[in-house]
Image (cartoon, rainbow, N blue to C red):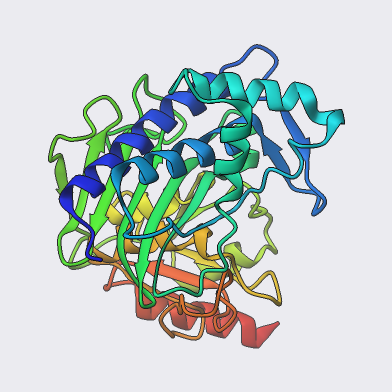
Amino acid sequence: MPLSDATAEVAVDAIAAACGVARRMQQRSGGPLAVTKPDASPVTVADFAIQAILILALEESGAADGPLLVAGEESAATLRERSHAPLLDAVVTAVQAWRQELTAEQILAAIDRGAHDARAEVFWTIDPIDGTKGFVLGGQYAVCLARLERGEIVFGALGCPNLPADASAPVDQHPSSGTLFVAGRGAGTWQRTEHAPRERGVRLRVAASLDRPPILAASHASTPSPTGFLTRVLARLGPGATRIRLDSQCKYAVVARGQADGYARGPRDVAGEFIWDHAPGTIVAVEAGAVVSDIDGRPLEFTHGRRLSANRGVLCAAPALHPRLLEAVRAERAAR
């Protein structure tokens, strides 16, 4: 079933609404309410609430001929535990601010409909809060959604509530309204605002050439030490190469609009990256003219279930930088 313009706009509306929910949660007195998952990663009220909102919005839009298939990051198992009743109450309150008539059980069921194995011909993938650590600490994070058809990403959207629309502004200068990045296969990448999600916005294109030292987007978790991997890669890119620091798939967005020239992520998990951590950002960057590959130069393969098990790491860069970045990463790994 091809993605209709109407379904795409409903998806973008839902991303915009989710940004508002996330902002309220982040600005909550005492910070976002969070617990620790069995894998030691944090999960917040916003993670659960936004996954429910996005899935319910897609279902309302008629985004599937049959049951909606979604590979999402969260499950409702934690919320069903009696010890986490206050967390469930907060999730229900957050979702009911979007749709007052929804019950707790409907919300829990919606979250659990994100359990698809990502092996169907057509499905959606969701990362409700990408960059949860950044979210908890008051930094950058993203609400992420993509649709895949036969292994190809055909639509993606990033909601970046704390990213200024002005690419010349510092990334830590948080705006009152978030920035949206919307991409469709063959239709380009467009920057919109959270408060006007259906306006066409500004089309983004990466620079065709690079006449200055490159800038890489890096997460705050990338240690800025003299011996750190990214520091050594920057050194191989030549004098003046530098970084801007921000968490989440916002890194793909700043590459798409030319605020950064590249982003490198080394392999950190033998099982591979999760698809929802990269599919939305990949199409946003690629449709703006960037190149996305793994650290071996191969395209990312979204046909192996919920993980990118056929790939090692991720590189995203403007065409003028990608070959140099790939060589720098290869040389650095060979030298280790």
Q: Is residue 171 above or below residue 300?
A: above
Q: Depth check: 130 or 108 in front? A: 108
Q: Which quarter shows the C terminus?
A: bottom right
Q: Going 72% across and 41% down the picture, which residue do you hit?
A: 42
Question: For this view, does 19 lie left or right of residue 167?
Answer: right
The residue that appears at 44% across and 52% down in the rendered structure is 251
**Taking 95 as reference, is 285 left or right?**
left
Q: Position of residue 324 (x, y in %)?
A: 39, 78
Question: Does the image show residue 215?
Answer: no
Tell me which corner region of the image, top left, top right, bottom left or bottom right, holds residue 311.
bottom right
Q: Quadrant of the N terminus?
A: bottom left
Image location (x, y in percent) of residue 79: 73, 36
From the viewer's side, name the closer residue of 46 and 295: 46
Q: Can residue 22 be seen here? A: yes
Residue located at (68% from left, 69% from top): 268
- Vertical arrangement, residue 224 with respect to residue 2, above or below: above
Q: In x, y percent, where is residue 305?
A: 55, 74
Residue 27 drawn above or below residue 323: above
Nearer to us in this view, 31 or 246: 31
Is 329 placed left or right of 19 in the picture? Answer: right
